[in-house]
Image (cartoon, rainbow, N blue to C red):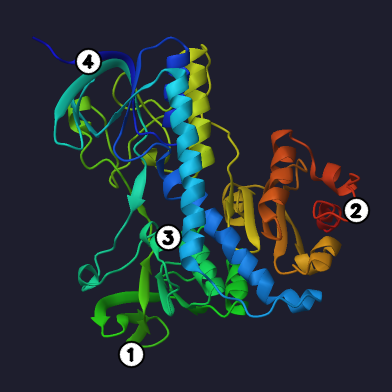
Amino acid sequence: MDDTKRYDAIVIGAGQGGGPLAGAFAKAGRRTLLVERTHIGGTCINEGCTPTKTMIASGRVAYLARRAKDFGVDTGDIKIDLARVRERKRKIVDEFRTGSEQSLAKAGVEVEFGHARFIAPHTIEIRKPNGELGEANADIFVINTGLRPLIPNIPGLADVPYLDSTSIMELDAVPEHLIVLGGGYIGLEFGQLFRRFGSRVTIVHRGEQLLPREDPDIAAAVAEIMRQDDIDLCLRASTTAVARTSNGVKLTVQTKDSSIPLDILGSHLLVATGRKPNTDDIGADAAGIDLDEHGYIKANSRLETTASSIYVIGDVKGGPAFTHVSYDDFRILRSNLLRNGNVSTDGRILPYTVFIDPQLGRVGMTEKEARDAGFDVRIARMPMSYVARALEMGESRGIMKALVDGRTNLILGAAILGADGGEVAAMLQLAMMGSLPYTTLRDGMFSHPTLSEALNNLFASV
């Protein structure tokens, strides 16, 4: 007797693309199964955007409280109750997760918790938490298994109780000295956050600059802000060994500036050196799914894998690992699979925000990318200290930079490192989506005093 359950569609992974897509299939009358290993909502709700930005909000309150006298306000001594910060974070995560669970139930999605693994091109084995095995097949599969922290192979690291981007948010006391291994988005956000909570912070990064994907001038401006916040930066530094000490942890690093190894002592270590795809045990070979050399699922611009009627969305396919990319992937598959659309990822404009403070809002190309692509690049650049609203808010750190094509006057990309930089960058994205020339923003009338008004003066410099 065949006990394999049959569905019209099976979605593996309940992230910010997989969950909505499962709901869309079910609402369209397709019998749909969603298989999830741990919890609904994926990285974003449970370990990523929602909890980190909730804690960053607490860090900003501490930062403003310490600066209160600058604004003529006396708040007294500032104390951080990290257990209460954690409790606030957990509550908001629970609310968001519950909302996602209710949406799936309302749509009529069947949810199975367990690990899904292909055993044939359109059949999966599901290992439940209690070890019980089941099988299911479907006409359509969508893989949304996401990423997990990448732990580097450093001698001694396995013997040290290090933190990753998930476990650091479960601390109930502020570290005395937090060492952050990695100067990317995650490392900078947590580094600045715990500095604001009162930790001494050292960021160790092997690259020439923080945020290696950014232009050097933007990365340098970010580094200056970190130093202004009394964060120690150790750049061009390779960690050669990690060891436990009586008071915490010791990193031995080799910098390009010295032939003598440097020992860095701290109470806690955060490893933030990147993430890797969750494809180790999904049965890719059995399904006919090709992976690249890093384990990411290969897909075309329509999100089709190398296996017939098996699709992929979100971080696990490689490329920029952002929630909004995953959600846009969902919209593409919903259109193509349920609405007879013909949509692809071609030409979509990529925005993102690094939630340091001030924010780094980014959209489109970097200067290097634009020049490498052969554009006649013109640069609009202006310090945030020229922005009236930023001065009034006492938030004048940072820089605004936009790239313009000298042949068409169209905006190619922008980096807004400043107060609400992500929101200002979104205005530039709208102009790019509408193919508006930069002169439209240069000559437009914006209400005063706002941060957006600064676009007048920014583009006056082109």
- Asked where in the image residue 429 lies, by quadrant, the reply is top right
Which of these two is toward me, 249 or 403?
249
Q: Amino acid at mark 3?
A: Met
Distance from Cα at disc 1 to Cα at disc 3: 35 Å
Q: Which quadrant would residue 205 be assigned to in this image?
A: bottom left
Residues at marks 4 and 1, CA–CA distance in whole angstroms: 62 Å
Q: Residues within 10 Å of mark 1 (few under 14, many from 20)?
A: few
Q: Secondary structure at mark 2?
A: loop
Total number of numbered discs in the rendering: 4
Q: Residue at x 30, y 19 (%)?
A: 308
Residue 165 at what x, y percent from top left?
A: 40, 59
Q: How far, Cα to Cα, is label 4 from label 2? A: 61 Å
Sequence-wise, the earlier of marks 4 and 2 is 4
Q: Are the residues flagged by discs 4 and 3 in contact, CB closer than 8 Å?
A: no
> Residue 405: where, in percent of width, then height?
72, 46
Read off the residue under disc 1.
260
Q: Which residue is mark 3?
A: 169
Q: Residues within 10 Å of mark 4 (few under 14, many from 20)?
A: few
Specify whether 33 is left or right of 44: left
| Nearer the camera: disc 4 or disc 1 | 4
Q: Tag 4: residue type?
A: Lys
Mark 3 closeness class: few <14, some 14–19, many ≥20 residues within 10 Å: many
* Residue 227 vertical position relative to residue 350 in the rendered view, above or below: below
User: Mark 2 highlights which residue?
Assistant: 448
Residue with the mark numbered 4:
5
Query: Do tag 4 and tag 1 residues touch (Cβ < 8 Å)?
Result: no
**CA–CA distance between discs 2 and 1?**
55 Å
Distance CA(mark 3)–CA(mark 2): 39 Å
In the rendered structure, which disc, 2 or 1, sits on the residue that comes first in sequence?
A: 1
